[in-house]
Image (tube, rainbow, N blue to C red):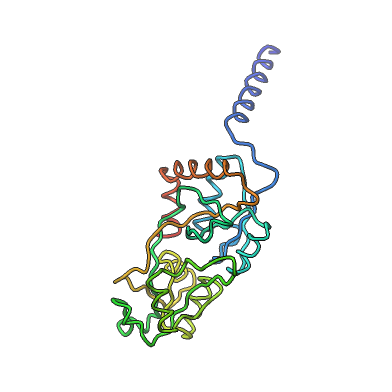
């Protein structure tokens, strides 16, 4: 009996040791990320938080997420108060603050949304269709950054016709649209559809033409994050995106 107990204890010790070796150890301090998009998930979820959290878990790191208006998010990053921003477009103007991984978190399509009541009345085949209509667009006003989220063609049109209504973020743009304060909102298709489902919003995307298509990335603070960590994250993200777990997250939030 004594020998059996010893053998049992030995096996338990070996299993514990193997688990400790195979499972990444979490850092005591979670990475602190900000975002300007909160659809009511809070700390509990959302596609970008879920993906980034799972990728970082494979690297032995955890993450906390806080939501603020767009300008505040960028101002706090510039002051070195965060480790990064969860979901941004990659642009040369932002590389003074951001170290971008090579791998995007997701590919995204930017379109115009209108109120359901205006479907058939308002359209977007050419920019001439937008003449005389106000369009809400998230705008970053920090002097150190240009605003790359406005697609080039739309930016040129808005400058020429003075119909841009700046907002503090994508959710503000959609709320203005719902309230009838603008005619169009320039928003990521996936985000707009998610907002529509979560809030039973009477809005619809115009799919006849896209404003832009491209990747959305994690912005890592150049002040606080080592470049080697960003490279490791990029590799881990690429590996994770090839798994069923990644596809399950996509289906959960954007069925």
Residue toward you, 223 or 125: 223
Residue toward you, 108 or 227: 227
**Horizontal and vertical percent position of residue 227:** 57, 44
**In the displayed structure image, the side of residue 119 where residue 183 appears, left or right:** right
Residue at screen point 40% across, 56% down: 107
**Horizontal and vertical percent position of residue 101:** 50, 48
**Horizontal and vertical percent position of residue 240:** 46, 43
Determine the image quadrant of residue 128: bottom left
Residue at screen point 33% across, 83% down: 122
Q: Is residue 21 above or below residue 65?
A: above
Residue toward you, 1 or 137: 137
Count of residue discs: 0
**Image quarter in which the C terminus is found:** bottom left
Q: Residue furthest bottom?
A: 132
**In the displayed structure image, the side of residue 46 where residue 155 appears, left or right:** left
**In the displayed structure image, the side of residue 121 where residue 64 appears, left or right:** right
Q: Is residue 35 above or below residue 8?
A: below
Determine the image quadrant of residue 58: top right
Q: Is residue 230 above or below residue 67?
A: above
**Image quarter in which the N terminus is found:** top right
**Horizontal and vertical percent position of residue 48:** 51, 56
Residue at screen point 62% across, 22% down: 14
């Amino acid at each position: 009996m004594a020998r059996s107990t010893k053998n049992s204890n030995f096996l338990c010790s070996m299993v514990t040791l193997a688990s400790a070796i195979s499972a990444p150890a979490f850092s005591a301090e979670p990475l602190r990320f900000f975002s300007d998009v909160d659809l009511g998930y809070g700390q509990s979820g959302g596609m970008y938080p879920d993906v980034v959290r799972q990728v970082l878990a494979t690297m032995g790191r955890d993450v906390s997420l806080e939501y603020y208006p767009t300008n505040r998010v960028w101002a706090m990053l510039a002051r070195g108060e965060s480790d990064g921003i969860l979901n941004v477009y990659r642009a040369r103007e932002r590389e003074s603050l951001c170290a971008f991984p090579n791998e995007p978190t997701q590919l995204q399509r930017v379109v115009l949304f209108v109120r359901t009541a205006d479907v058939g009345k308002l359209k977007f085949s050419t920019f001439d269709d937008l003449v005389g209509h106000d369009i809400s667009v998230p705008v970053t006003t920090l002097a150190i950054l240009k605003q790359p989220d406005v697609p080039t063609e739309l930016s040129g049109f808005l400058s020429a016709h003075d119909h841009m209504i700046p907002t503090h973020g994508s959710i503000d743009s959609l709320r203005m649209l719902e309230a009838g304060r603008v005619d169009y909102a320039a928003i990521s298709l996936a985000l707009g559809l998610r907002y529509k489902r979560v809030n039973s919003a009477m809005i619809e995307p115009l799919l006849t033409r896209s404003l832009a298509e491209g990747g959305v990335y994690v912005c890592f603070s150049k002040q606080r994050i080592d470049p080697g960590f960003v490279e490791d994250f990029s590799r881990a993200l690429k590996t994770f995106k090839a798994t069923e777990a990644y596809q399950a997250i996509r289906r959960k939030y954007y069925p």
